[in-house]
Amino acid sequence: MARIHAETHLLDRIGWLRASVLGANDGIVSTASLVLGVASAGTDSAGILLTGTAGLVAGAMSMAAGEYVSVSSQADAEAADIAKETAELATNHDHEREELIGIYEERGLDRALAEQVTDQLMAKDALKAHLRDELGLTEEMAARPIQAAFASAGAFSVGAALPLLAAWLAPRAGVEYWIAGASLLFLALLGAVGARMGGAPVAKAVLRVTFWGAFAMAATAAIGTLFGTSVA
C-alpha cells in the first residue's frame, strides 16, 4: 500500500504571522523607546510606567485600526475582482475559457492538454479556477481584516508589555540599561520565532530586528537625555 506523503506549507500562516510579528515587534520597539526616552529625561518610576501603559493602549488601538483599514481595502479589491470575474464568466464564457487555456499553455502544456485541463477545472468550479490561475486569489491568501486587526492589537500588547515588565521590575537606578537589554533580548527571540514559523533564515531575522530596535532606542534615549539636561 502506497504511503501518503503529507506536506506542511507555510502560506496559510502568512496573513496572521505577518500581522503578529509586525505587531509584537512594533510593541517592543515603540514602547521600549518611549519609556527609555522618559527615563533618560529623569522621570520617576511611576511616570515611566504611566507613559509606557499609555503607549501600550494607544499603540494597540492604532495597530488594530490601521491593520483593519489596510486589509479591508485589500478585501474590497478582491471582492471587486471576484464580482468582475463572475460577471465575465456569465456573459463571455468562451473568452474566459480561452484565457485559461492560454495561461496553461504559457506554463508549458500543449494546446490539447491545456484545453482538457481547462474544461475539467471549469466544469468543477469555473470561478475558483479563474480566481486562482488568472488572478492569483486563493482561500489561504484571502484578506481577513478582523483577524489581522485582532492579531496586530494582541501582538502589540504582548510586545509592549515586555519592556514595561522590565521597567517595573528593575531598580530606578540604571533602569535604562535594564529596559534596553531586556528589549533587545525580546526582539532577538521574536525574530528567531518569526523566522522559524515562516521558514526564513533565523540569524538574518534576529540581526535585522535587533539592529533597528537598538537604533530606535538609542535615538529616543539621546533625545530624552538632552531634554532632561536642558530642563535641569
Image (spheres, rainbow, N blue to C red):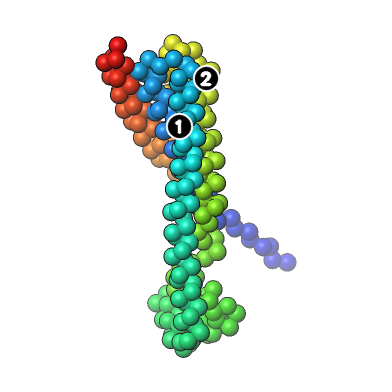
Q: Is residue 37 left or right of residue 45?
A: left
Residue 49 at x, y = what percent? 49, 22
Give the labeled residue for mark 1.
55
Instruction: Judge by depth and name the residue closer to the eye, 11 or 48.
Output: 48
Q: Secondary structure at mark 1?
A: helix
Give the labeled residue for mark 2.
168
- Mark 2 closeness class: few <14, some 14–19, many ≥20 residues within 10 Å: some
Q: Is residue 39 above or below residue 114?
A: above
Q: Secondary structure at mark 2?
A: helix
Which residue is depicted at the point 53% across and 24% down? 165
| The residue positioned farthest toward the right in the image shown | 1
Cα–Cα span, label 2 and label 1: 15 Å
Instruction: Judge by depth and name the residue closer to the eye, 35 or 217.
Output: 35
Q: Quadrant of residue 201?
A: top left
Residue 39 at x, y = what percent? 40, 19
Residue 232 at x, y = what percent? 30, 11
- The amino acid at mark 1 is Gly
Q: Is residue 232 above or below residue 25?
A: above
Instruction: Judge by depth and name the residue closer to the eye, 99 or 90.
Output: 90
Which residue is depicted at the point 59% across and 58% down? 7
Instruction: Judge by depth and name the residue closer to the eye, 61 or 138.
Output: 61
Residue 10 seen in the figure:
no
Residue 58 seen in the figure:
yes
Choose the circle earlier in sequence order: 2 or 1: 1
Of the residues tagged 2 and 1, which is closer to the observer? 1
- The amino acid at mark 2 is Trp
Q: Quadrant of the N terminus?
A: bottom right
Residue 158 at x, y = what percent? 54, 35
Q: Is residue 216 left or right of residue 67?
A: left
